[in-house]
Image (spheres, rainbow, N blue to C red):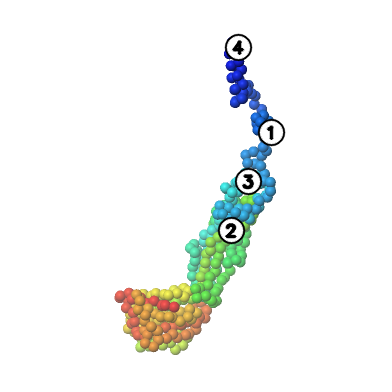
Amino acid sequence: MIKWIGQHIFDLITRFRSDVYIDNISETTQTHVIGIDTDGKLTKFDTPSGGSGGATLDNAIMPTNQGEGFAHMLGVNVVDTNTITDVFELILRPYIRTTIALDKVGFQKETSAGVYAAEAFLTGTSTSLEVGQAFKITKVEYEVADDSQTTDTSVDFRKGLSNIQTGFADSNTSLQTLTSAEVYTNESVSSTSGDSYQFNVVAIDDGGSTLGDQQIVSNFKTFYSYHRLKIGAYANADNSGFDTLASAAQAKTLFDDMTTAKNSLQGRSNATATANSAMNDETKYTWIMYPSLWGELNNVYLLPGTPLGIGSDGAWLDKQTFTFANNYGHDVEYYAYRSSITGAYNNTTNQQIQLIF
């Protein structure tokens, strides 16, 4: 019996040395937790404050990490009143700026001096005008992807960096009529690649609670102002036409009345024309006319790769230069090149010539 009691006491000691069991514990809200120090002694200490990542930062932080995943945090001052949760949300769930798109613009192009065509709509990226041809913007249609992120009535319609009309509703998705349709006219083209009018819309994204206001910018709708290139044929002198041009008036007549194989608004670039029946007519010369701004031709090729030559023994005569008004009353200096023979190119075999600048 004594031996059994001794063994039982030993077993209890062993049990308490390894595990502690407490029966009938009631549950209450605890302000302390129990720990064990290095000597194995039970101790108590306060529970951590904050909980669930709610502890605030000790100091303000200005992120400098330029890794792609932190780009949205650069320049954002995370202050010492932000919680750990705030910081992790800023890292893992960044505020994404909304977007704005210019869907279409309504416009009217001049057809002759002071006369405008019916309203049309530009839904693509661009349209073309001839130098001196006026146009006016009449309507705009735009869309903000998430108008809860933008400031009310912060949408502005612009030409380049200049406001045309401000204060459009940020929630709008329908056509808006401009209060006044300003007329634009490019009286000269200074670039060999053409000049442009660029229109877009902007709005203010408020940046949520951390990033602050920022302007968001739409795509552009562009009106390009170009000179006109013409390649075609016209009757020679035996058929009441010209062998050579004697005046600006004759050059104007030729420019207006030639039967064109190519008639395009464009900037300076190598250009190809396929022969038409007029260019195959033995009573007609083939002509090339374009603005002198583009400079002289380097050569004219019969495709796929035969240089025809200009001047002396070439298939094309040296240029002539004349200034006359285009259809919109704008004076342009043109170069005119004439083929050395009539009926120069065969349309039945679809011969092609290429201008090389």
x%, y% of residue 309? 38, 83
Q: Residues within 10 Å of mark 4 (few under 14, many from 20)?
A: few
Q: Of discs 2 and 1, which sits in the foreground? A: 1
Q: Disc 2 designates what residue?
A: 216
Of the numbered discs 2 and 1, the one sitting upstream in the chain is 1
The residue at the point 60 percent across, 66 percent down is 161
x%, y% of residue 300? 39, 80
Q: CA distance from mark 4 to mark 1?
A: 43 Å
The reply, left or right, for residue 255 in relation to residue 8 is left
x%, y% of residue 273? 38, 75
Q: CA distance from mark 2 to mark 3?
A: 25 Å
Name of the residue lying farthest toward the top: 1
Q: Of discs 4 and 1, which sits in the foreground? A: 4
Q: CA distance from mark 2 to mark 1?
A: 53 Å
**Which mark is on residue 2?**
4
The number of callouts visible is: 4
Q: Disc 3 designates what residue?
A: 86
Q: CA distance from mark 3 to mark 1?
A: 28 Å
The reply, left or right, for residue 286 in relation to residue 127 is left
Name of the residue lying farthest toward the left: 348
Q: Quadrant of the N terminus?
A: top right
Q: Are marks 2 and 4 in contact (CB under 8 Å)?
A: no
Q: Disc 1 designates what residue?
A: 45
x%, y% of residue 307? 37, 80
Of the numbered discs 3 and 1, the one sitting upstream in the chain is 1
